[in-house]
Image (tube, rainbow, N blue to C red):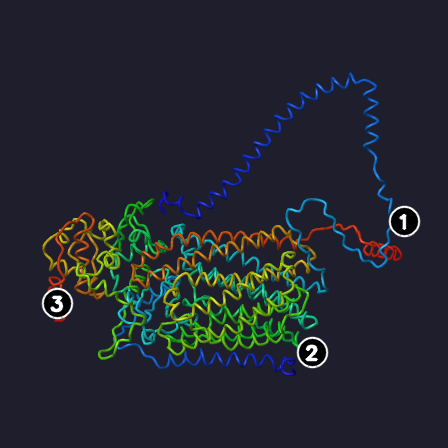
Amino acid sequence: MEFFDNHKKLFPTALGLFVGLTIIVAILPAINNQENNAPLPASIPLTADEIAGKLSFISNGCVGCHTQQVRNIDMDKMWGNRPGIAADYAAITRTDFWRNTATLMGTERTGPDLTNIGNRQSSLAWNLLHLYQPRAVIAKSIMPAYQWLFIEKDSLEKGDVEVIIPDKYKKGITGKIIAKKEAIQLVAYLQSLKQIPLPDGKILPDFLYKKEINPKAVNTNTSSLPDGALLYAKNCQSCHQENGEGLKGAFPPLKGSPIVLGENLELYVTIIMQGYDARPEYSVMNAVGIANNLTPEEVTAIINHEKTSWGNAAKPVTPEEVKKIMDFINLTAKK
Amino acid sequence: MDPKNILSEWGIIITLILIIIPIVVGAIIIIIKANASITIYQKRKELKKFIEHLRELSPEESDRLKQRKKELEFTLSNNELAGETAPIDSKGLINNINEVAALRFIEQKKKSQPRPYIEPDLTKLILWYIGCAAFWLLFGTTIGEYIGIKFVAPDVDHYSWLSFGRLRPVHTNAVFWGWASLAMMGLAYYVVPRVSNGPIASVKTGYYSLILINAAVVFGSICLMAGINNGGGEYREYIWPVMALFGIGVFISLSNFLKTISNRTTKEIYVSNWYIISAMMFLLVIAVVAYFPSWQTGLGETIVQGYYMHQGVGMWFMLFNLGLMYYFLPQQLNKPIYSYSLGILAFWAQILFYTLIGTHHFIFSAIPWWLQTIAIVGSVGMIIPVVAGTTNFLMTFKGSWNKISGSYTLPFYLIGIIFYFTGSMQGTAEAFRFTNLVWHFTDFTVAHSHLTMYGIITFMLWGFIYTIVPRLTGREPSQITVGAHFWLALIGLLFYTVPLMYGSTLRGLMWIDGKPFIESVELMAPYWLWRAIGGSLMWISHLLFAYNFYVMVRKKETIEIPISAIDILRAKAELDLKETIK
């Protein structure tokens, strides 16, 4: 055919087809998307430190293992309260003239999703230790250790943030480990990652592919509570550790803890829901319960797991008791 | 890992078996040797006795032995039927006689074809391309091997430049833009002029491209390790000034090829050139769209990222390699391609469907639902070009299957074609919404990209390189090392991908179950170990490939003494000519 034998016709045709399709599936949707989406009203721009932390996040290629997107499927519920929408990313523009926009949505979850990490794990001490040596807080973690974000000093100077390192990871270190500014900024960025609530009245987009609840399991009255060990692993274990012994100088043990074993349920539930900062020898605990929307049943399951594990043998509590306290907490929190 | 458990790990057991085998073989050899020396000692004793007996040998006995000797030595002259006339092969039918002198432990494969005429300048250029590509393959996969090890031993080092997040893009970009791209371009410098049946427009331009692309990979790798990257989109980690070098390199070679094609002496444009030229044009479109430095706010970036990374894979690497395949496969099998029109159908279908599928990397994300659906539909549409292409190649093979066992290049082609089918179809299956639930975000994607970029692209490129380099240089690699390269790469790839796919499936199911995330990390540990083992085998095969390439191009003075009648007469003529000049 003449057409196929003429390079002046054949190649421009192929190119035209490709460019045409490119415009339809890439360029127009991309322009449409960036023109027609605005950040949510409740979103707060990043501070200078958080921006610096984000640059560090980009530099070190964290996106290679951590996504920042909550898909609209049931299994992604653990990463956020609602599926991500275009507006969540609308405020992100080009990093600078040399570098492209970093939505950091990612394609690989070798490590957990970080969309909501600022709510899930906001403790500065935990984050710094985790950056210095992830295996000090999560034994099975394979995350790289970012030790170049820290320096060793003989003594603390004013404004220094010291990181308490467990002895196991202290080989060859004689002085104190101080977080560099970059590490603090990186943590500031991580703490800023919080899913923004939709404006009032907006209907939450639905999660698809809901898990089918096995009716048999619901009917058995023996254990209507969720799995306490599982909830503990998801919400508490990264600080208090699997063996309930915590980490010396950072996170208190729950094994033999007077609060866990004691009778003051109100204090216990309040700590889980709203966090705790009463003991100077340990780091601040963030509001785990509120941040993760724990239900009274879930809190009860966690409490009962803690009360009966690692040699602890205290009397379990009922969801009704916990619910009463939580209702009260919610009431005072709203005021 | 617990040292007690390590012995129950299959990887360790197999490694141990592999170590034990040579030890056992060594022990057996020692026993045989010892046994032999004992026998010799006993024989010596016997010999002494025999010599005494010889001294006292009687004349009668001696005569009898002489008579028997004569009888035993009788033979036919072997000329009883043929007579004394010298044989004449008046029609030159008997040629290239290959006598088997020794046992053949390794089957002798067919030697490469004699060298066609290619300008020495162009030969040198092509070899430079392939040489640089081989370097980037070694460099890129050494990095890959190292980051694979980091999954098993995360504390192996704590330097920022060598941290996982920075090295991962160094690996992927070096093998993409350094290895595969340079190898393809080098091979195109061979194919484009040959199918145009004319000389290349400019050899010099080829060198400029080579320098620019190498510079892009060097600067790109340094930037990434120093922490300067584009913001995280896969294969888009080089910043735009670096990628511009690459783009200019492709652009000038593209115009070089277009000139060559417009000067062609054939009427038709062979289908290889359709694919090759289109791949280069499309790459430039993709790069400009993705790198133009003043747009892509918010999700715009994600939509473009999906488009960019998948077009990079499918429109640059795949299209280019298919073009090369349409030249090399028929040429290796010494017969025309099964169906030229299937090749053309596959070409247009590939453009039509492949362009649509980019966003299937963001199924269930916040990008528009209709765009996700189009991507899934496009992925299904890919069945057409893939089946058309595979059928075309396999039907070209039909009737020549016996050639595979006798060739050291064709196995690479066949594996490439098989992975072309399975790898691409796997991609289609992965794009479905349900499979996304299980596999998305897991290492299944990593396994898939190795099955395709390695199983398809790299295997094909190796086949092409082993085909043409011996022709260009006149030197062949040892068939044993080519065979070892093939098998190590193939077995390594399977060790790498199969456990990773299995483990990822379990991991995805665990996520659906809502298990704590860290349990899914723990689950992957043995599969990551397997990946490191498979990766090591692949890496060793690359060392062999680099060695083979060295053997093919090294300048070794060879003194050839003419054997065939033609060569002897030619040598005589040359000698006579020289002497008359004197």
The residues tagged by marks 3 and 1 sit, at their Cα atoms, a distance apart of 117 Å
Three-letter code, disc 3: Asp
Q: Chain of mark 3?
A: A
| Category of crowding for the residue at label 3, using alpha-carbon neighbours closer than 10 angstroms: few (below 14), some (14–19), many (at least 20) | few
From where the camera sits, is residue A193 visible?
no
Q: Quadrant of residue A319?
A: bottom left
Q: Residue at x 40, y 43 (%)?
A: B7
The residues tagged by marks 2 and 1 sit, at their Cα atoms, a distance apart of 55 Å
Are dots 3 and 2 on a single chain?
no
Can you give x and y, in whole percent of width and height, for residue B19 in the image? 50, 42
Residue to which mark 2 is pinned: B267
Q: Chain of mark 2?
A: B
**B503 and A16: which is toward the camera:** B503
**B310 and B407: which is toward the camera:** B407
Q: Foreground mark, 2 or 1?
A: 1
Residue to which mark 1 is pinned: B85
Q: Earlier in the sequence, mark 2 or mark 1?
A: 1
Q: Is residue A178 above or below residue A20?
A: above
Q: Chain of mark 1?
A: B
Question: Residue A327: which disc?
Answer: 3
Can you give x and y, in whole percent of width and height, for residue B180 in the image? 55, 63
Q: Is A276 on the left-hand or right-hand side of B311?
A: left
Tell me the element at label 2. loop
Among all residues in the image, which is located at the extreme left? A263
Tell me the element at label 1. loop
Three-letter code, disc 1: Thr
Q: Quadrant of the C terminus of chain B?
A: bottom right
